Amino acid sequence: MGSGRKEMQVRDARTASLDIMFKARSVAVIGASSDAGKIGGIPVVLMKRHFQGTVIPINPNRATIAGLDCAPDIASVSPPPDLAIIALPVTAVEAAVGDCLAAGVKSIALFTAGFGEIDAAGLAAQERIADRCRAAGVRLLGPNSLGFIGFHSGLYATFSAALDNVWPKPGNVGIASQSGAVGTYIMALAAEAGIGFSHFVATGNEADIDVADCIAWMAADPQTSVIVVYLEGSRDGARLKRALAAAAAANKPVIAIKPGSTEAGLAAVKSHTGMLAGSKRVFDAVLNSYGARPAESIEEAVDLAYACAQGKFPASPDAAIITPSGGVGIMLADAADRAGLVLPPFPASAQADIKKLVPLASTGNPLDTTAQVANDFRLFGSVIDIAAGQTTVPTLVIFMSHMGKTPGVVDLLRPTLIDVATRYKDRLMTLVTRATPEFRNEMSALGYLVFEDPTRAIRAIGGLRHFAAHFALADEPAVTTTTVDRQLLEDAASSAPAAARLLKQWGLPDLPVRSAETEDEAVRVAKELGYPVVLKIDSPDIQHKTEVGGVDLDIADETRLRAAWKTMMATVAERAPRARLIGVTLSPMLKGGVETIIGTQNDVDFGPVVMFGLGGVLTEALQDVVFAPAPVSLGAARRMIDALRARPVLDGWRGAEPSDIDALASAIASLAAVAAANADDIESIEINPFVALPKSGVALDALVQMRARKD
Amino acid sequence: MGSGRKEMQVRDARTASLDIMFKARSVAVIGASSDAGKIGGIPVVLMKRHFQGTVIPINPNRATIAGLDCAPDIASVSPPPDLAIIALPVTAVEAAVGDCLAAGVKSIALFTAGFGEIDAAGLAAQERIADRCRAAGVRLLGPNSLGFIGFHSGLYATFSAALDNVWPKPGNVGIASQSGAVGTYIMALAAEAGIGFSHFVATGNEADIDVADCIAWMAADPQTSVIVVYLEGSRDGARLKRALAAAAAANKPVIAIKPGSTEAGLAAVKSHTGMLAGSKRVFDAVLNSYGARPAESIEEAVDLAYACAQGKFPASPDAAIITPSGGVGIMLADAADRAGLVLPPFPASAQADIKKLVPLASTGNPLDTTAQVANDFRLFGSVIDIAAGQTTVPTLVIFMSHMGKTPGVVDLLRPTLIDVATRYKDRLMTLVTRATPEFRNEMSALGYLVFEDPTRAIRAIGGLRHFAAHFALADEPAVTTTTVDRQLLEDAASSAPAAARLLKQWGLPDLPVRSAETEDEAVRVAKELGYPVVLKIDSPDIQHKTEVGGVDLDIADETRLRAAWKTMMATVAERAPRARLIGVTLSPMLKGGVETIIGTQNDVDFGPVVMFGLGGVLTEALQDVVFAPAPVSLGAARRMIDALRARPVLDGWRGAEPSDIDALASAIASLAAVAAANADDIESIEINPFVALPKSGVALDALVQMRARKD
């Protein structure tokens, strides 16, 4: 979803200022140790061996470390280095930062722990350090950071012990992680899966540089094609949104592990729909709106990064499956369905050609060659060749069972696999097979994805297709509107008729709502509106009218209306004895249509968000509600509707007429625009219900809640 | 769910008759080949090397094969072998089977393909063969079977090529698969994960022996503790149910991969609720009712089998997580929540002890030691020791990051890990770590589960807990009832008042339903019932009354009733012009409560099933419906209710009173009993709605559909 995604992205100064760190040509290590296992020793040893730039260990007590000449202090290093790593005890850090700034160091990576992650004093210290760096125009990584790695230049500005037992190769996948442990765990598993990396950054306490910075920087980094992030929360929602937008504009997939929830850090959202919400959902909605793909496990993130690194994003959901096992074919088809892939039939000519080669083949899709190919595996190669020749199907999945572990069989298939990879370079071709590392590497180098588990393979392809669909989105301007005077909003927050007037002004269709202060006036108004009518209590103190007996529907005539008035006044007075009762509102009773809820909230992290769901308790119980950061385009609003699990209900369930999706999308986008334009004043709006009708939609009730004034 | 699960299981004759095959002491291979790569050569070579019994290659043209003396024909083998493998060309098979039976062979494994999987002639041939075997009391595996393996005795009655590149060790996991390719793929991946096997069976075309037979046999097999099955469908639903019941009674977990759907093979279920149903759901319900655990991928099945093989099933959902990384802790906590695990706080004394060792530790659960333990990994060991000492928490999950790949660290931790494993043998202890194969094997041998991916580890533990909960279920008798005369059912199928009478007879509470054939009679009846009333058309030809305008609710008085009568008669006449209209039914209008649907269907595979869901279009759109094979116990009915995603609605949503779950469970169990007792006559029943009330529940409408008579 989101909007303006494709607009020209110019790197802002904040992003550009990271170059000096992540592309450093000279690095000083303050607290350099001759113990190669220590936090101040590891980076010296690693960079001595691999860094293409200059490394200067700073240690007043030693002449050399790891064969490199030491400087006694940072002031002695001339010219000042692009990067200073600080690996000192916590008590020495502030002085060292001062020395760095005085010496003209251009960026600082602060490994030392014992700051904001420990206590308030540590937090204060880290903020002092960050403020001083900021004032000096020096970017700061950490504190409590495992550091970062530039794999292409050998810039191992890290003390990670993971590098003891895995050595990731340079490549095009970037990792940015708020947790050093999770980040290196991802990196290690990904490296073992054959993935190569551009950059790795562990952002630690994020006193300055955060994951959003890293995303923005990698979005413009030519070495990075795929961005994997682990983030528990956001320091600055607006910055994260801009970073994600930059990655999307660069057509770089962002794979996000976002565990847990940050509810505790959120102002409680009090409105009725808040019950459904939660920062995790808003966070997910933000990621989703910029096309980032959440991964529920490290394995899922690694699989998808591996697939993305090949750079092939299928242009349509069509896929062809070839298998010598009908059973695996069914499993792959199941998985494909869950992943949103489509399995079109093979063209008749291709089916005929395959039948000629393998008479027992079942030429549906999945195409089951049967075990007949085990008699001559070259037949299997020929079938692959025919299937790959289909120009309209961008994705081919080939189950090879144990073949990839059987060198004799690999030898028979290799010529075809090389030939097919060469001739159909644009095709996404996946081999699902038990494989020797050699076969896996050989095929990966040819451009094949190689997976062992059928379901994991298809899940990763589904992820590629997700990115392809997102990259293909046309630039869609968000629906916007202007700010409303606060007094008008306050009126709407306390009076239903005022809210109704505002809805109309905002372009949200409504039904007439009329006020009445006495029973007789209600009877007069109802006669003018025409029976049947809906009666609601009118009170500035009552938000959830139903629960205090303040709503009566489908009142057919005056007798019922008078009875309803009396019952309502008595019930409300009993259940909400302190509420000031102004009278009632009346509106025509609407029959048919689908009740929906459209709402907005003002998220403390991400600002205004819009939400949409169907009405009724089941929607709440099943949490079938969709969020998006506001404002949204009409296309994004439509995708919100489509993302609802209960979407079929709007298509005309059980013979009803389909709902007017355009009207619904327009209402969602309009309300989102209002929330975005009035974010300083509006805490939340809830239209409940907005009734989706076959050729329109109407807002039946609106609840506006104001933010406290900033002053 | 299910019932009578724990009753004494006696092996039936059909199951016992498999012993001679799966425990064969002498095997003849008909079609034995001296080519060690051929279907008739592979089993000879494998068994020559590994089988503890006697192998007799049958080949009239050779004196020896693989160093074993050949017999010229099966008749020459004396005494006749326990098992004859037939690996001949398809044209020679029927004669060979005849020879085997004549020679007194005790069981046959038929490898040859080209039978029922090819065409009708092949199917007829396979049925002839199966009939002849059956008549002779000889069990038949296949045709088109990859064979079977008894790992403990080296009985490699298979031609699987998977054994070329993986050699599974003997162990306690049994595999039965309808697909040889899927079965061997599972076996190979599982073997690589360190799992050992008791038996492997590929059932091929299942002319006789099917997966249900294998489950039943493994349920009683002392070498098998865990059963993994791949099944696309069931040959005999009743037999599968018995087999699953036997496995459950033996407390043996059944892990089932059940891909695809068999809708095509099902009689279309025409009733309204059928829209929600489908054989896949019924199949899943059958598996679920006997505690079998579905796996969506091979990987998931392998992970769970690996975990089950250790034989520890946690007695409560409580788990403790220890991690040196807060980030991984959050991921593990997320996964634990999804897997139904609970993370109770550590006792204060344990927290204090840990704080003493690791002052920076955050002693919640997950317990985050922080990277402080990297300074002295023995501290991490001490923390593990303290955590393992908690007697009330059966499950411990320890994230060890890269430690398992770092021999120096392993050496520091080994003493504690051995000590803890020895002292707390009943504890389920899981290490999540990158691991060398040596460390993984060493720890697995000590009783630890070792996983690399945190999410996969927790998912597997969730599976163990699923089995533990199921094993712990008390034996619960199903609610049963007696058969109803078909004429009474037919009356109910065509008349609402008759249906209402039957509901009452079945113990399902209802509201009074009265008939009226004229407008004036309706007015009289309504006055007797008391307004408001519900008016419904009464016609033997109309099933979905709402859709033809045949339902009017909440009629408050005579005026509205007369208007409603006229409108209804006109609308129904227009929309259902051919329907015979008897008149209307009237009942009191019920307000409040939660509308549910209770239904039954007669599944062609599994017989009567009962379904339950909430009323309303959302339930259908979201497919939030639960099935179980009928009859069910009251406990099983309760678990059906609990399995609903919308379950919170019944707990008193938005301040409503909670529904009477006992009344609901009783209604479900009663209707299931009726469907089971009248399975020959009733196709489906639907009570829609059954209104769940705070202290009772009432059936407002019932629709009975009859099965065609068998004659």
Image (tube, coloured by chain):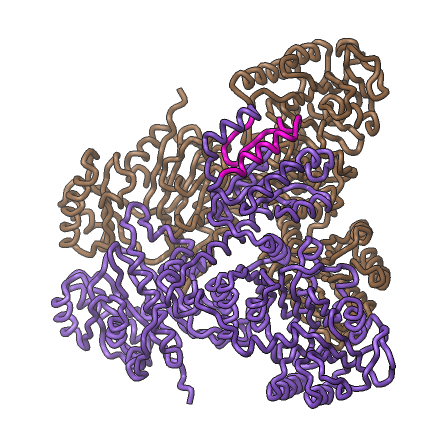
Chain colours: A purple, B brown
| A93 to A338, vertically: above or below | below
Quarter of the image that includes the N terminus of chain B:
top right
| A161 to A332, vertically: above or below | below
Residue at x-position 17% and y-position 39%: B573
Image position, residue B414 (x, y; %): 84, 60
Please report the bounds of the magenta region as a residue range: A361-390
Instruction: Identify which residue, A201 or A585, lies in the foreground.
Output: A201
Residue A83 in the figure: left or right of residue A463: right
Image position, residue B405 (x, y; %): 79, 58
Residue at x-position 37% and y-position 66%: A477
Which quarter of the figure has residue A14? bottom right
Residue A155 visible from this viewpoint: yes
| B433 to A359, vertically: above or below | below
Residue A573 in the figure: left or right of residue A89: left
Quarter of the image that includes the C terminus of chain B:
top left
Image position, residue B3 (x, y; %): 56, 40
Residue at x-position 81% and y-position 60%: B406
Instruction: Identify which residue, B357 or A673, lies in the foreground.
Output: A673
Asked whether A373 falls inside the magenta stretch, the response is: yes
Residue B285 visible from this viewpoint: no
Image position, residue A687 (x, y; %): 32, 68
Asked whether B414 falls inside the magenta stretch, the response is: no
Instruction: Identify which residue, A702 or B521, lies in the foreground.
Output: A702
Which quarter of the figure has residue A385? top right
